[in-house]
Amino acid sequence: MGIKPVSEKIDLDGQLIIGGKKVTDLVDEFGTPLYILDQDTVEKNCQDYLQALSKNYPKSLVVFAGKACLNVGLLNILADQGLGVDVVSGGELFTALRSKMNPLNIIFHGNNKSIEELEIAVENNVRIILDNEQELENVKQVTARLGKKARLMIRIKPEIEAHTHEYIKTGQIDSKFGIDKNDLIKIAKLIVSDDKLDFLGIHSHIGSQIFDVNPFEDLASLMIEKVALIKSELGIDVPEINCGGGIGIQYVESDDPPAVSDFVTRLCSKLKAACERENLELPLLMLEPGRSIVGTAGITAYKIGTVKRIENVKNYVFIDGGMADNPRPIMYQAEYTFGLANKADKPTTDTFSIAGKFCESGDILANGISLPDAEVGDVLVVYGTGAYNYSMASNYNRFCRPAMVVVKDGAARYLVKRETFQDLVNLDVV
């Protein structure tokens, strides 16, 4: 997959080019900080999944994990590629419904969905991933009031260890997400006994930014085991399974994620073998990649405002963004690859700490980063920021969240416009 967008080039003047556009030209036109998304990389990453599944398991649906990066324009690109989307809030659901996405290919997650959110999902025939028994009662209230059926899948905790950051594990026994797998039959029985509920299948997710395929193979075997159990206990077929997402991407050279084709091949091989062993028809397989669709497609561009050298101690580069547009380093100790867009062909000369402009000592995007001779006015770029940067951005210190543009074939267009100071006070009550 690589760290950098597939369209990246360096011209004869040492200028970084993404999607046929000079990054410095994009900065001049759209300002900084600026999220830049390479459409070629997004489309390639979609095709990596679609082609691998077509070869190994055609009865499938790729569902983009919307929490990674969600706006109407991006969803339109993904819908054109044939993807669905999973959402985790009323706001994400509203956004998806405003896009080209087919509502039948929208999946609604969350461990505490409100009644209002469930009503929107049921009204639009969106799949609801049932997270707990109380939610089942809430869904029943909604279907009774609306007189419409709800399309449900049950999320189970697989209790499979995934080697990733503690904050992004989701499959362990003490996770806030999903029901205990031992309660699966009880919940499934309650669903199939209600004629206003349509039981579609089961879902599970083990975590995020995972490099090891073995846990996914274990998950595949577990899911088919549970499909067989439901058929044995309740006498019904399970038409769909959803194995979540979680395959990692390369942020720095030392990261070693599996190729999407290898991941898909191994997962599907396990699924097919398990179905054959249990004498089951192959269910529809859904996968929910997020980071591996958009992560490496994105870079963030900043202007350097100050270079501060503390002799024999540390060199700082101060940028015009930081933890408000990229909270991952302070939250997850996330690492990134950096460069200078206007000196892309120059050798590195020194190491720097990349510091943001926010009123926190911890607002440091990285330490010990090798760069060419950094100067005021240079454009710093951070690679691999297509996932969880825009979606986790905040207004801390009354910061205006950045614009996002998509680039392709020498053209750039807004996906999200930059917030203004007026936007910050629009909801204030005087």
Image (cartoon, rainbow, N blue to C red):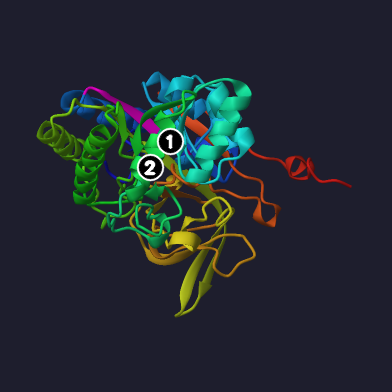
- Magenta span main SS: strand
Callout 2: helix, strand or loop? helix
- Residue 108: x %, y % from top left: 48, 34
Mark 2 sits on what residue?
Answer: 186
Who's the residue at 34% across and 36% down the image?
A: 202
Who's the residue at 19% across and 25% down the image?
A: 281
- Residue 256: x %, y % from top left: 23, 52
Residue 338 is inside the magenta segment: no
- The CA distance from mark 2 to mark 1 is 6 Å
Can the viewer see residue 260?
Answer: yes
Callout 1: helix, strand or loop? helix
Mark 1 sits on what residue?
Answer: 190
Q: Quick check: 10 above or below 162?
A: above
The reply to whether discs 2 and 1 touch (Cβ–Cβ < 8 Å) is: yes
- Residue 30: x %, y % from top left: 59, 36
| Residue placed furthest toward the right | 430
Relative placement, left or right, of 109 versus 429 is left
* Magenta range: 58-66
Relative placement, left or right, of 412 versus 424 is left
The amino acid type found where label 2 is placed reads Lys
Can the viewer see residue 417?
Answer: no
Which sits in the foreground, 130 or 389?
Answer: 130
Relative placement, left or right, of 39 versus 139 is left
Instruction: Classify the position of the N terminus by image quarter.
Output: top left
Who's the residue at 45% across and 48% down the image?
A: 381
Which sits in the foreground, 18 or 384?
Answer: 384
